[in-house]
Amino acid sequence: MTSEEDSGDPKRPQFGSRFLTDDKDVFSHNAWDQIDWTEEQLAEVDEKIQKNSADRVDTDVKNDFLSRAGHYWNKFYETHQNKFFKDRHWLFTEFPELLSKEVVNIFEIGCGVGNTVFPLLALRESPQTMIYCCDFSPLAIDILKSNDLFDENRCKPFVCDVTSDVLSLPFDESSLDVIVSIFTLSAIPPKDIPRVISNLCRFLKPGGLFLFRDYGKYDLAQVRFKKGSCLEDNFYARGDGTMAYFFTEDEVDKYFVDAGLVKKSLITDKRLQVNRGKQLKMYRIWIQAKYQKPG
């Protein structure tokens, strides 16, 4: 599995500020921003995706992935515990709104074992701050609660399937300052994504923000899938049974605008990561967005 957390130095400047102007310098840093692909590179990547998407997963197998998603995520956390993802300290560079004094109630969907929660708890020391967080996996929530940094007075984790038609959440509609989704919506079936976003947006206050970061189409993780992994266009099953969708900017914008939100920013983060030891180049594409509820 390719981890979105392989994002270089967590103290690096906000993306968009480190440019590769001379190819001979490529291995002097761990990552470069806003890398423009040549037509040849794009054609090569597109061909690879067409090949790995040509043979679709059998319908019965696909239905198993969809119906047992919780089982596969539980197995993932049973295997990796809290050792797979790194804490997301970079969030405060990309989303400084998370540190605003006006922000009190924060809700993260797909919190996993707390890689967003614990940096938030560390930097937001105000007793008024309440961080709600949910995950599909009961085991992930148990691991989060067992962490020595967990503070039950400022953090309320719970198990939830956000694809449910009716959401039962421990807070009122129009009560949240911020909703955070970091590499979470890509894990659910594409047909469910518009409804999930629409349902969640009801819980934002007027003026509240939805912060989003997830896989973009043509990302290295998509290119690396083998034949027989594709469930439908841009939607794949990994070897461990978890799933991943790869977004375009237009799709993301439509999802949030249709849910009644207003775009504050929408950026495709085209990054070149390098392994300086092995002299490897890795092209990553992530979609990052901020949308606001009118009011």
Image (tube, helix red, strand yellow):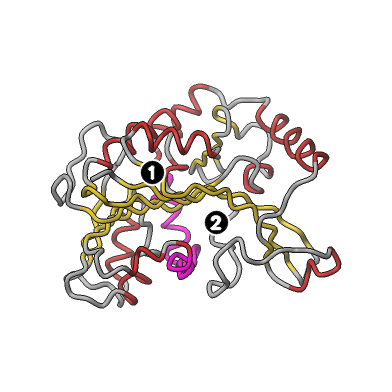
Nearer to us in this view, 247 or 136:
247
x, y (%) of residue 104?
Answer: 22, 64
**Residues shaded magenta:** 70-93
x, y (%) of residue 203?
Answer: 21, 45
Name the amino acid, label 1: His
Q: Which mark is residue 4?
A: 2
x, y (%) of residue 144?
Answer: 32, 65
Are there few (<14), some (14-19), or many (20+) residues within 10 Å of tag 1? some
Residue occupying image coordinates x 57% and y 28%: 233
Mark nearest the camera among 1 and 2 is 2
Spatial CA distance of label 1 from label 2 is 22 Å
Query: In the image, is 295 to the left or to the right of 29?
Result: left
Q: Quadrant of residue 197?
A: top left
Q: Quadrant of the C terminus?
A: top left
Q: Quadrant of residue 113?
A: bottom left
Give SS at disc 2. loop
Q: Is residue 276 magenta?
A: no
Give SS at disc 1. helix
Residue designated by label 1:
71
CB of mark 1 within 8 Å of CB of mark 2?
Answer: no
Residue occupying image coordinates x 34% and y 76%: 123
